[in-house]
Image (cartoon, rainbow, N blue to C red):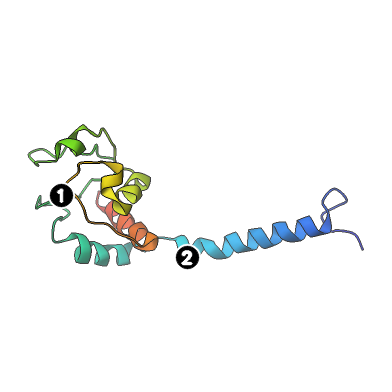
Amino acid sequence: MGCPAGPGIPHLAMRHLLLIIAALGLARPALAADLAHGEVLYNARCGACHSPDADRVGPHHRGVVGRVAGTVEGFAYSPALKAAGLTWTPDLLDRWLTKPAALVPGTRMVFRVADPADRADIIAYLESLK
């Protein structure tokens, strides 16, 4: 019996390809960020130092995605963050929340979010703060 994909693709290779495609399709929903959960996490984990609209121990976060790090007018940033020259993108925020001091040695922020799904949810919430 021949492979339905044609003579150029061996049956076993086609089977592996279909398994990989199926696995990726199943994994995709697990990676989707949950905005509502992100807001809950933000309030619980970030809210002591940050808020969407008021500077506290840390700067406000409304508009953080796309903003150059260290540029909120009047906020006293660490010299390291002011000099970093970073623009906050979702990928950069993920690295930041994983371990801030690894991304910007000398930063004052020490809080970390270990779980990748939690980071994705928090970042989704931050992206909604336009």
Q: Nearer the viewer, residue 13 or 74?
A: 13
Indicate the secondary structure of the residue bearing disc 2: helix
Contact, mark 2 vs mark 1 (Cβ under 8 Å): no
Tell me the quarter of the picture where residue 44 sits: bottom left
Taking the view exactly as shown, the residue that stands out farthest to the right is: 1
- 78 left or right, relative to 129: left
The N terminus appears in which quarter of the rendering?
bottom right
- 34 left or right, relative to 73: right
Percent across and percent down for residue 7 are 88, 51
Indicate the secondary structure of the residue bearing disc 1: loop
Disc 1 crowd, CA 10 A, few/some/many (<14, 14-19, 20+): some
Percent across and percent down for residue 70 are 18, 38
Percent across and percent down for residue 80 are 19, 37
Q: Where is mark 2, residue-wise?
A: 30
Identified at 15% across, 49% down, the residue is 60
Q: Looking at the picture, which amino acid does disc 1 mark?
A: His
Q: First in sequence, mark 2 or 1: give its number.
A: 2
In the image, is residue 23 above or below residue 79? below
Tell me the quarter of the picture where residue 17 sits: bottom right
Q: Which mark is residue 60?
A: 1
